[in-house]
Amino acid sequence: MYKEDYDSFREERGSDDVFSKPVRAGKRTYFFDVKSTRGQKDFYLTITESKRHNNADGSFTFDKHKIFLYKEDFEKFREGLDDVITYIKDNCFGGEIPQRQKDESTDENY
C-alpha cells in the first residue's frame, strides 16, 4: 500500500473508528473499517476501494468508492459474496481463482 494512500485516507476518517484493516491488492487498496455511531451504541462496516492515479505532472490523486454495511445486513452480504465467489470459482476459472502476480512496476514502498 502506498504510504500516501493510507495517510490521506486516515486524515478523512473521523474519530468514530474502532478498527481498520487496509488490504493492498495490485493498484488498489481496500479499507475495511469498523466504525461506531454517535454515542458508540452501535457499529457498522465501511468498505472503501482506493485507487491511485498518477498525473502527467508527477502528482497523484485517489479515486475512492465507499460502501456502508450495517449489522442487520452482515449475514445477507456475506452469503451473497460467498455465492458469487463460489459461482466464479466453479464456472469461470475451472474451480480456482488465479492468484495475482507481483507487479514489478508497482511501488511497494510504505
Image (tube, grey):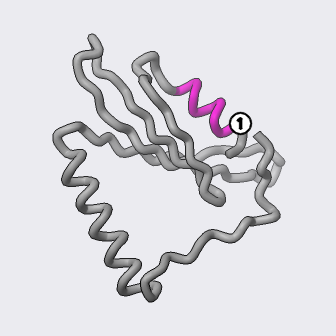
Q: Main secondary structure of the magenta part?
A: helix
Q: Position of residue 55 (x, y in %)?
A: 75, 51
Q: Which residues are magenta?
A: 4-12
Q: Is residue 106 left or right of residue 37?
A: right
Q: Is residue 4 left or right of residue 78?
A: right
Q: Residue at x 61, y 50 (%)?
A: 24
Q: Quadrant of residue 62?
A: top right
Say whether residue 105 is magenta: no
Answer above or below: position of 106 versus 100.
Answer: above
SS class, disc 1: helix
Q: Position of residue 87 (x, y in %)?
A: 32, 78
Badge count: 1
Q: Residue at x 56, y 41 (%)?
A: 22
The quarter of the rendered structure image containing the C terminus is top right
Query: Which residue is the site of mark 1?
Result: 4
User: Which of 25 and 55 lies nearest the eye of the viewer?
Assistant: 25
Q: Residue at x 57, y 33 (%)?
A: 9
The quarter of the rendered structure image containing the N terminus is top right
User: Which of 15 and 34 lies nearest the eye of the viewer?
Assistant: 34
Q: Which residue, as the protein is rendered here, is positioned at the far front?
A: 95
Q: Position of residue 42 (x, y in %)?
A: 24, 23
User: Which of 74 and 66 lies nearest the eye of the viewer?
Assistant: 74
Q: Is residue 5 left or right of residue 18?
A: right
Q: Quadrant of residue 92?
A: bottom left
Near mark 1 (Cα within 10 A), the count class, few <14, some 14-19 or many ≥20, is: some
Say whether residue 10 is magenta: yes
- Disc 1 marks a residue whose amino acid type is Glu
Q: Which residue, as the protein is rendered here, is positioned at the far left?
A: 72
Q: Residue at x 53, y 27 (%)?
A: 12
